Amino acid sequence: MIRCLAIDDEPLALKQLENYISKVDFLQLVSACQSAMDAIDILGKEKVDVLFCDINMPDLDGMSFIKSLTNPPLVVFTTAYSEYAVEGFKVNALDYLLKPFSFSDFLRAAMKVRNQFELENKPDSPESCQDDSIYFKTDYKIVRVEIDRILYIEGMSEYLKIHLDNVREPVIVLLSMKKIEDRLPSGKFMRIHKSFIINLHKISQLTKGQVIMEGGATIPTGELYRNRLMEHVNARFLTR
């Protein structure tokens, strides 16, 4: 079952959400909240897989609420204002339901939720462990990136720059360093600075406080990460 949290400050709209969720056999309603502040309290206590969240709410609007979450669940926005659609996709919202929406509209969004949930929670298999690429959403399209072509990843606030072999412009995605660090194979990639993850197989040289990558990019090493990097290097250091 996919555990849901419904959030809307309008009682009738919230009741409709509850009704729609109850009709979908793979959704389970954890709670229905009339404010984002109530939702924050629920998220601190319960496991939630998806938020069906209104945008226009007093005190803390839905968009700001989602941006405030470190690791937000899947998000489907519900609102009466179509101008929020682009902003919604900037926070990686899975779908956007424009009020008033029908049950068929809701079901379409619910199917998207199920597909994404199953994709993210697919158990590891020998094939998936050998996966050699990652898909990213960027500029309203999905791009495939071969893991071995990644030189390094640069964190910039809420965004990442993924620098690739023989490609001048990096791939820019809205994603956290922690999320991509968890996805990359630890034997090939290492975080050497709060803002940088490098491909260990693409190191060209090491100097004091810096790593020089193939292609010439110079990456700083942070104090908190330096010992781990040197342990990796020393394990492969060849002396006479």
Image: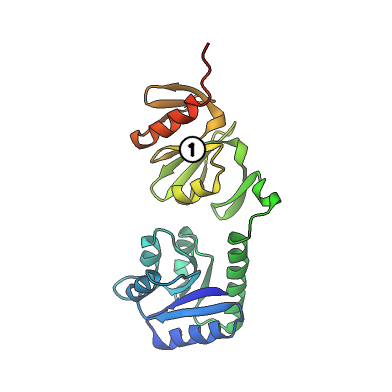
Residue 205 in the image, given as x and y percentages of width and height: 48, 21
* Colour convention of the picture: rainbow
Residue at far top of view? 240
Left or right side of 81 for 183 = right
Three-letter code for the amino acid on which mark 1 is drawn: Met
In the image, residue 233 sits, relative to residue 108, either above or below, namely above
Q: Viewer-proximal residue, 233 or 199? A: 233
Left or right side of 41 for 128 = right
Query: Label 1 neighbourhood size at 10 Å, few (<14), some (14-19), many (20+)?
Result: many
Number of marks present in the image shown: 1
Does residue 37 appear in this view? yes
Mark 1 — residue?
190
Q: Which residue does the image show at 55% across and 44% down from the upper left?
A: 184
- Say what secondary structure mark 1 lies in: strand
Q: Which residue does the image show at 34% across and 33% down from the upper left?
A: 223
Q: Which residue does the image show at 64% across and 45% down from the upper left?
A: 133
Residue 104 in the image, given as x and y percentages of width and height: 62, 81
Residue 87 in the image, given as x and y percentages of width and height: 44, 62
Does residue 76 appear in this view? no
